[in-house]
Image (tube, rainbow, N blue to C red):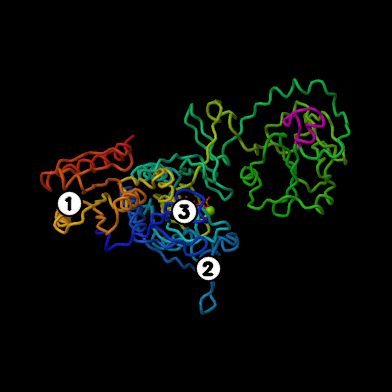
Amino acid sequence: MKASSYLVPTAKEDPQDAVVASHKLMIRAGLVRKSSAGLYFYLPLGLKILRKIEQIVREEMDRSGALEFQLPILTPADFWKVSGRWDKMGKEMFRLKDRHDNENCLGPTHEESFCNLVKPMLKSYKDLPINVYQIHTKFRDEIRPRFGVIRSREFTMKDAYSYHIDDESLDKTYQVMRSTYRSIFKRMGLSTIPVQADSGNMGGSASEEFMVVSPIGEETLMICKSCGYNGNIEKTPLISHNTNAKSTLAEFSQSDKTSTPNAKSISEVSTTLGLQDKDCIKALALVSDDKPILVFLLGDRELNEAKLRNHLKTNELRPMGNKELEKYNLVPGFIGPQATYHSDLTVILDASIDSNLGYVAGANELDYHYRSVVMGKSHTQFDSIDCSLTRKNDPCPNCGTGLDEEKGIEVGHIFKLGQKYTEAFDIKVLDQNGKTKILTMGCYGIGVNRCMATIIEQCNDEKGIHWPITVAPFEIALVSITKAKEDTAKVEKIYQELVSKGLDVFWDDRDLGPGFKFKDSELIGFPIRITIGKAFLEKAEISILVRKTGEEILHQFTDEKSLYDEVLKIRTQLYQELEDNNHE
Ligand code: ATP
Ligand code: MG
């Protein structure tokens, strides 16, 4: 491809609304342009990258035995009413009516559509297992579209759904997907870690997210360098270790009521009493599906909403309003676990509260706390569950070593769904004994555009992007710096020869200065750059530069064939590095 007949709308300046490297570089390198909030135009260079990523995903999915489909993006409300998600999906779903007044939505995911499609085709256990997928557009009206294509409102997803006669078969496919995902990400040069993820409260027994560790990530990952445990913070259990609370609190007498004027927050209370936050008990008054909930945590801990939601089997959780606090006789800022509660209240104690120790807790009376409240046996009527967020240095749930904390971007998700959808759609087959059996299901997603952006997050430097060769828009940039016609003709001959031998070359033949062309090639991030300029004309020397490492080879030009051999060697090596990666 010649640059003179291509479109290279690069820019020097970062776009004003971009805060992360990938967003800035995608725009500056001329890969995408913004259409409006969360919507992007893909330009030819950007689209090539996207297609290469899709192709890697497709090849690996096909290799795993999955079957590719393409379903309509527009889906009828009726499908969603079967699973109950028409009412549950909320505002993230783009809904629209057709001319006959029928309700539809632009699919944010396709469990319902695939269930509808496969149901009449699956009759016997012999038809199973089956793993169906598509690589197609999804719409989600994200509340905060941001970071360019990382969180957009229209994006391409590979979504796969597997159907099984039993859990054993589901687990087999789940493990195949797990290793397929590793191959997919490694082939595209993206380093990811699978982390244990929250399966939500809608059934489903196992779930892992593939995370790209990055400071811009919206997810928090707890990582154990010692045993290899990786978990999303939402999922990571907190193993309690509250032994030293005893010594600090031993001096206080039981339930010693103390005046704590205006001390409402934990830090105000602990400062007033000269203690540490962890010596106090924190109360959270919440409402879940109209039910009042009171949660008690150690003062230095934060609530893990996902754990609490799962326990309550709900999605909805909000703080109690003033009227509700009044209704349940709760005095905000001074709520304590020893109070006698309104019978409607569900009281939950975090498991890290030691029922044998004394803690400072609200007296449920304005401006008063108790200095030492011991839960003891009288509190066994409260549910004690793990609902704290873990944090750095908490013990690893596997081996007890202090955990590390990282931020991560989710690029893929594998999930054992269980029978939520197969039951709703009544998908059953005859088993070996001729009995009907409801199937069980898995689902597996990858965000294609998000992969593209996260590769840039991992592969950039001050000059721009350095694409892994497997997903580069072109593998090789040929930069020519010649003026005379006969010199340009020599370059043309070399270019034609390389292309005819099958190399993927982007020839920057534009009538621009060398500095400009070098900058563009580094910004766009072609993995290999061949420069033919003064040194070639004077002493037949051609520079071959590896973008990522900056390594330069000076090739003594004799003929096109030997240049081709040299470039091919480097190209093969770059592919090899990703391959080697793949078999780690
Ligand atoms: P997130 O928590 O980031 O919103 P999700 O849990 O909603 O992700 P899934 O429903 O599991 O995501 O979708 C599968 C994949 O689709 C994700 O792993 C991610 O790579 C991609 N994805 C999800 N939402 C978006 C979006 N708004 N823009 C781009 N990619 C997305
Ligand atoms: Mg989401």
Which three-letter amino acid code belongs to the residue tagged 2? Answer: Asp
Helix, strand or loop for disc 3: loop
Q: Position of residue 171 (x, y in %)?
A: 43, 43
Is 393 part of what is drawn in magenta?
no
Dot 2 alpha-carbon crowd within 10 angstroms: few under 14, some 14 to 19, many 20 or more: some
Residue 498, numbered circle: 1
Residue carrying label 3: 14
Residue 78, numbered circle: 2
Q: Residue at x 39, y 49 (%)?
A: 432
Give the alpha-carbon distance from disc 2 to disc 1, as whole Å.
55 Å
Mark 3 or 1, closer to the camera: 3
Quarter of the N terminus within the rendering: bottom left
Q: Residue at x 16, y 59 (%)?
A: 485
Identify which residue, 494 or 358, lies in the foreground.
494
Residue 464, numbered circle: none
Q: Residue at x 64, y 45 (%)?
A: 305
Which three-letter amino acid code belongs to the residue tagged 1? Answer: Leu
Which stretch did the figure color magenta?
A: 266-281
Which three-letter amino acid code belongs to the residue tagged 3? Answer: Asp
Q: Position of residue 12 (x, y in %)?
A: 42, 54
